Each structure stands twice: as structure tokens, then as C-alpha cells.
Image: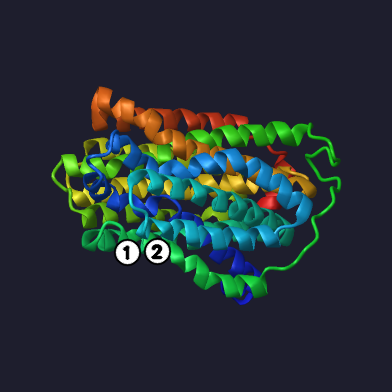
Amino acid sequence: MMELLRDRQALALLLAASLTILSNATISPALPGIEAWFAGTPDAALLTRLLVTAPSLTVALIAPFAGMAVDRYGRRPFLLAGVALFALSGSAGLIVPDLYMLLASRLLLGLALAMLMTAQAALVGDLFEGAARGRFMGFQMAATNFGGFVFVALAGWLAGVNVFWVFALYGVGLLYLPFLWRAIPATRPPRDTPAAGTDGGEGGSGPWVLQLSFLVFLAGVTFVLFYVVPTQVPFHLARIGHGEPAAAGIVVATVPLAAGCAAFAFGALRRRMGPGGTPALGFTVMGAGFLLLSAALSLPVIAAAVALVGCGFGLVLPGFIAAALDVAPPARRGLASGALTTSIFLGQFISPLAMQPAVEAIGYVDAFRVAALVLAALSVTVLVGLRLPRERALHQAG
């Protein structure tokens, strides 16, 4: 870990990745207050929940094109421009006058995320190989989620003072820019070279495309379920008598803290369990968290339940990203990261649209139980379906 912190490029990539945790869940503690503030707006309940996931819609539409542009024109300019736009569009919530303009600023935030995330992931693929890449992915997930714990907890406190102050947190991107400008290398887009498990050429077909498509599907479904926590749990807490923003902030912030802790073990677990076994374990732990959440009433038990969800997630997400970078040819890493980013944020956007009718029909408790069952099925699916050649998987994992 100390070796990474002494590497300016690695530290810059960690800082850039840490911004992504701010994109959606940071405003979760403020949602009930924002809904009450704009209570006179038609469909305020749904629109307020969409504030969390609105950036995901833009990312889902833009990320594949951003990934292709990153492959063609280079990583650095897109990363720096994405960080600047992220800070400006995210903090716009401090001054916008109505719910519709607030929603529009969140859509613009998604454009920034598409640029930032595709360039950052492609740079990880370019600068790290084999075991070093697996270790970096674990540390990146840990650093991102520990930052998320701090940001979400701070957001809970800010929301208790003024629900709109949470948007000031996005301005941290401007503080990162000078260091990113100096540290991010101005690399040329790489050319395709033959690699194990890929077609090694310019073509858009081959084993790597099938493997990437499977990862894209799994990532999307994962985020539909994972985003039940920031979009639904604050309202579940209010329903059972814990409606204060600070309570929601603490509970939601437990998720990235737990995910960060679990991510430290990602490299070692992937080396032992392989590219399928690690996310399978993650799905199982996430399912156990939702099952416990369905029965929990006290804040400590609820926090423990969402901590399990976070722990599982800390094993699932870096596994998908590492596998996507493993299978894609070098000159297609931007496209691969764009496709995976699209699935992640499309899943986030779909989550409240899919879960809100379910919650209204069967209630929070049964909705959490259904999520647990789906995650159990995903555990079996990924264990059977994610098949990287054993020799290369062991080499990539460490």
C-alpha cells in the first residue's frame, strides 16, 4: 500500500476514482428533506429518488462513445475534463431554483462521470499488469469506499443543517485537479497486440467480446440490487421510526466502509478462488445482508445488515473490472471500460424504477427478501458462467 502511495500516477488514479463514490449515494441522506422542500412539484417522490440515479442515465448513454473516444484520442484529456465538469455540475445543486433544474444538473454530472470513469479505468489497464493490476484494483476499491464513508457521513451531518449543502462536497474535484494535471501521464493510445484469451486484432468479435458481454450483464443486475440501499433504505428507516438524516447518513455510510475493508482482501481471494469464485462469494454475502435487513428494526442491526451488503459488493465490483481489463485487447480497454460503466450506471438508474413498484406492492421487507433470493441465484450463475482460462486467471490474480 505504501508503495502505491509513493507512486504519483497510482495516487492520481486513486483520487480520480474516489470521486465516483460522490456521484450518487452522497445525496441519499438529504432525499427526504429535498422531497419535503419540493413537495408541491408533481411526482416529487419519484423525481427526488431519481436525483440519486439521474447521472446513471447519462453515463449509460454516453460511456460507450466516451470509451471509444478515449481509445482514439488518449486518456489524459478526457480524465481532466471529466473531473472539472464533475465539480461544476455536481455543486450546481447549491444554487438551482427548482427540482427540474436540479435533475438536469444531475444529468450533466453523468456526462462528467462517463468521461472520468472510462479514462481512469483505461489508464489502470495501461499502467498495471498481472498481479499488480489485481492489487491496485483492491486498493482502489478500498480507497474509494473509505472516502465514501467519510463523504456520506459528512453528507448526513450537512443535510441536518441544510439539505442542499450536501452538493458542496462535489467541489473537492477542483482541489484534485492541479495534482492530476501534473501526475497523469500523456500517453498515446495503445495498439492492439495479441493476448491470451483475446482475438488480438482490430475486430469486434472473439472470445473476449462474449466474456465482456457476460460481465456487462452481471454488473447491471448487481447495481439494480445494490442501489436499493441508498434509494430505499432511508425511506425504510423513516417508516420504522428512524427518520432523522443523521441516522440515514450513518447507515448508508456503513456500506462503503465495509466495502473498503473487504476490498483489501480482494487480491488474495481472487488468487485463491479465481475470477468466478470471488464474485460468487460476494453475491452470497450481499444476499445474507439483504436477508438480515428484512428482519432488522434497530439501527445497529440495520447497520450490520447493510455492512454485509457492502462487504459483498467490495468483492464483486473489482472482480468485474479486473476481469474486463484482463479479457480486452489493450487498444479496446476504453471500449471495455465504457461498456462496463454503461451497465453499472444503467443498473443504478433502473434500480428505483424497478424497486419502487415492488416496494409499493409487497413492502420493504418482502422486497429485501426477493433481493436476497436473486443474489443467491447470481452467485451460482457467476460461479458457473465466468470462465477465464485457469492458467491466465491465476497469472492475472497474482
Residue 49 rendering spot, x and y as whole percentages: 34, 40
In the current view of this chain or complex, which residue is farthest to the top? 361
Labels 1 and 2: the sequence-earlier one: 1
Camera-side residue of 131 and 199: 199
Whether residue 393 is visible: no
In-image side of 100 versus 327 (left or right): left
Viewer-nearest residue: 287 or 394: 287
Image position of 24 with respect to 87: above or below: above
Secondary structure at numbered mark 1 = helix
Horizontal relation, residue 74 to residue 358: left or right: right
Q: Which numbered marker is on residue 169?
A: 2
Location of residue 382 in the rendering, given as x and y in whole percent from the top left corner: 56, 33
User: Considering depth in this image, is 122 or 288 the residue closer to the camera?
Assistant: 122
- x%, y% of residue 353? 39, 31
**What whole-number distance in Å separates the C-alpha atoms at marks 1 and 2?**
9 Å
- Examine the image and state in which quarter residue 236 appears: top left
Q: Say if mark 1 contacts mark 2, CB within 8 Å.
A: yes
Residue at 27% of width from left, 49% of height from top?
Answer: 34
In the depicted structure, whether residue 257 falls above or below residue 172: above
Please tell me which residue is depicted at 23% across the width and 40% down the height of the picture.
40
Q: Which mark is residue 154?
A: 1
On the rendered structure, is 254 left or right of 385? left
Type of amino acid at the residue the image marks with label 1: Leu
Q: Amino acid at mark 2?
A: Leu
Identify the residue shown where x is 28% and y is 38%. 44
Residue pictured at 28% horizontal, 34% vertical: 42
Give the number of the mark in front: 1 or 2.
2
Image height check: is 75 above or below 373? below
Q: Residues within 10 Å of mark 1 (few under 14, many from 20)?
A: many
Asked if residue 157 lies left or right of residue 276, the reply is: left
Q: Of helix, strand and loop, which one carries label 2?
A: helix
